[in-house]
């Protein structure tokens, strides 16, 4: 064979081919037909090839034109070859096929070999190229491709076939690796439409479109044997959020089991990760959990107690009065039907004595409560990627009466369920908590510094007593829980919200029940939430 005869040949849609034997210039159109000069005929009508190169050329030319029948006729096993080739073309559905004929070996009697390279265009950015060898045989003066599955791909064996593995792949996963957003032919979508309903746009907006795509070699039963091209796991590593599917399921089950309006927000104090946020169908404000502003009621005694401890007014063991009612300035304060007489600060906190903490608030500087609230993040401002939040608003009191009302979480004090969860997380961790959905995904616009370790140690003891012998004993069987209950009047005072804020281990949470008129249902809901974990 001359050096020119051993030269590589390109065969494909809209590509020029230099024929090995005839040296004719042949153009194969996208439809698979050929046009040739006078010394060459189309592969589908020419007489049987009289040399190995022409036989290999006829086969590759027909395959490049996606003509399985013509390619099969260039082999010595027409029916069998046709089945395999037709299946491959129908399954892979290439937009274009290009074949390159390489070196054709000198015949060894009635046998020869020819190298080939195939390139499949399988969509944008998916170009699959591989090389192999054709076995050629001569019978009655005519050369043909000796059919074997390797004539389609060098690793393909009898009974095997090529398939496309294309499926949705995770685009966003939770802290445990469970898919939250998947990417596929339809773009990005939630893995579970019922999970994290308040975070749909935040989650899908952070995912990167991708799709698992691979050409696989499978056996006769369809079992994958080998990935020949592509990546069955997708092109991109999924984004990871701090959310927890398990925690969300527990939170959603808890609020869905409540007949009124219920919201629950859970954070991880050590990281600031938002673990779960759930509202039931009764809540009409879609932004309630993140930015709804509500009177925190007695949960704010966490702040008042901190301010009083920092000011040196009391210690947890100090004796303080807790009368049924107390007139402070122009305001008359009342407890909810109880009188403890002279008691300790920690017991007054556990029983949520309004008269005690209103009196302590009245003894603070005008900005005392605002400064203490700031130490729990209630005046902080965070730009959380994918969320719009408002943790709260606590300003210095305008007058003495307002200071008294603020001291028990009424007055002008405002907190969101998210802010209440941050307050609990700060008490738990002793650090400034930066809430986040994504690592490095929160901008601190206005930060804060937590109370001192000694003050927080005293506060935690009081928060624990709330559960062991105070207003939240409904949580006493839920593990080592720390917290504070709250009932907050709103509007004309005829109705009140119910609250519980607290933590257990590295889980801080806030339960808010709009118009519940009591904190006991919030305690029960908190117990149900923890019980589901």
Image (cartoon, rainbow, N blue to C red):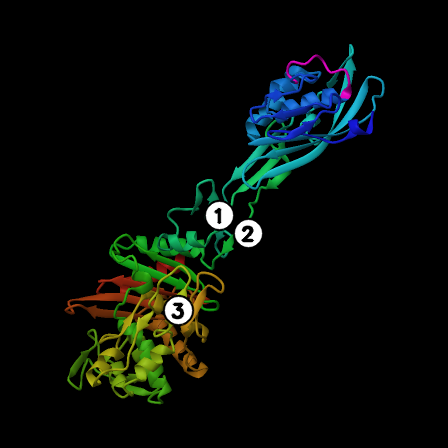
How crowded is the residue under tag 2: few (<14 C-alpha within 10 Å), some, or many (20+)? some
Residue 139 image position (x, y, % from top left): 77, 12
Q: Quadrant of residue 504?
A: bottom left
Residue 59 image position (x, y, % from top left): 68, 22
Residue 208 image position (x, y, % from top left): 49, 51
Q: Nearer the viewer, residue 370 or 471?
A: 370
**Mark before the other along the chain sequence, 3 or 2:** 2
Residue 414 image position (x, y, % from top left): 27, 71
Label ID, residue 355: none
Residue 44 magenta-highlighted: yes
Q: Quadrant of residue 150?
A: top right
How crowded is the residue under tag 3: few (<14 C-alpha within 10 Å), some, or many (20+)? many
Quarter of the figure that contains the N terminus? top right
Camera-side mark, 2 or 1: 1
Q: Which residues are magenta?
A: 43-52
Q: Nearer the viewer, residue 100 or 153?
A: 100
Q: Nearer the viewer, residue 194 or 86?
A: 86
Q: In whole angstroms, how far apart are the C-alphas of marks 3 and 1?
A: 28 Å
Depicted 375 relative to depicted 498: above or below: below
Quarter of the figure that contains the C terminus? bottom left
How crowded is the residue under tag 1: few (<14 C-alpha within 10 Å), some, or many (20+)? many
Residue topped by disc 2: 237
Q: Is residue 188 left or right of residue 122?
A: left
Residue topped by disc 3: 382
Q: Nearer the viewer, residue 167 or 119?
A: 119
Q: Is residue 23 left or right of residue 93?
A: right
The answer to whether residue 66 is visible is: yes
Depicted 314 relative to depicted 52: above or below: below
Could you tell me if the residues under marks 2 and 1 are in contact, i.e. CB atoms within 8 Å?
no
Camera-side mark, 3 or 1: 1
Residue topped by disc 1: 209
Q: In whole angstroms, how far apart are the C-alphas of marks 3 and 2?
A: 27 Å
């Amino acid at each position: 064979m001359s050096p020119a005869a051993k030269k590589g040949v390109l065969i494909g849609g809209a590509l020029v081919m230099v024929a090995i034997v005839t040296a004719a210039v042949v153009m194969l159109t996208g439809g698979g037909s050929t046009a040739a000069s006078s010394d060459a005929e189309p592969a589908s009508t020419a007489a049987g090839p009289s040399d190995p190169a022409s036989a290999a050329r006829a086969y590759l030319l027909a395959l490049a034109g996606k003509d399985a029948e013509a390619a099969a006729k260039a082999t010595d096993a027409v029916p069998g070859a046709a089945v395999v080739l037709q299946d491959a073309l129908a399954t892979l559905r290439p937009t274009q096929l290009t074949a390159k004929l390489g070196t054709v070996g000198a015949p060894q009697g009635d046998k020869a070999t020819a190298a080939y390279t195939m390139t499949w265009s399988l969509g944008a950015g998916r170009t699959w190229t591989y090389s192999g060898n054709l076995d050629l045989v001569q019978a009655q003066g005519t050369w043909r491709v000796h059919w074997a599955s390797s004539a389609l791909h060098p690793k393909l064996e009898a009974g095997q076939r090529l398939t496309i593995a294309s499926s949705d792949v995770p685009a966003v996963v939770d802290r445990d690796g469970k898919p939250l957003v998947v990417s596929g032919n339809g773009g990005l979508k939630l893995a579970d439409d019922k999970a994290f309903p308040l975070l749909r746009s935040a989650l899908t907006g952070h995912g990167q479109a991708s799709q698992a795509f691979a050409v696989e070699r499978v056996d006769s039963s369809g079992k994958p044997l080998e990935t020949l091209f592509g990546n069955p796991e997708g092109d991109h590593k999924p984004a990871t959020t701090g959310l927890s599917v398990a925690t969300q399921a527990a939170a959603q089950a808890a609020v869905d089991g409540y007949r009124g309006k219920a919201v629950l927000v859970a954070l991880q104090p050590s990281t600031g990760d938002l673990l779960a946020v759930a509202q039931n169908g009764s809540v009409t404000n879609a932004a309630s959990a993140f930015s709804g502003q509500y009177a925190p009621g007695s949960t704010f005694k966490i702040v008042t107690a901190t301010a009083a401890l920092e000011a040196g007014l009391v210690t947890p063991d100090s004796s303080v009065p807790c009368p049924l009612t107390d007139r402070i300035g122009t305001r008359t304060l009342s407890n909810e039907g109880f009188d403890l007489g002279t008691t300790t600060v920690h017991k007054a906190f556990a029983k949520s004595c309004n008269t005690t903490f209103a009196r302590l608030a009245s003894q603070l500087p005008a900005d005392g409560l605002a400064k203490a609230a700031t130490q729990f993040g209630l005046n902080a401002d965070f730009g959380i990627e994918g969320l719009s939040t408002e943790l709260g608003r606590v300003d210095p009191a305008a007058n003495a009466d307002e200071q008294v009302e603020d001291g028990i979480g009424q007055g002008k004090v405002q907190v969101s369920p998210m802010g209440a969860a941050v307050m609990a997380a700060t008490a738990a961790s002793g650090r400034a908590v930066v809430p986040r959905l994504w690592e490095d995904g929160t901008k601190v616009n206005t930060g804060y510094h937590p109370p001192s370790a000694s003050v927080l140690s005293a506060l935690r003891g009081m928060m624990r007593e709330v559960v062991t012998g105070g207003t939240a004993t409904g949580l006493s069987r839920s593990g080592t829980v720390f917290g504070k209950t709250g009932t907050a009047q709103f509007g004309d005072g005829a109705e009140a919200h119910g609250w519980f804020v607290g933590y257990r281990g590295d889980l801080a949470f806030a339960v808010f029940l709009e118009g519940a008129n009591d904190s006991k249902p919030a305690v029960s809901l908190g117990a149900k939430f923890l019980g589901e974990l």
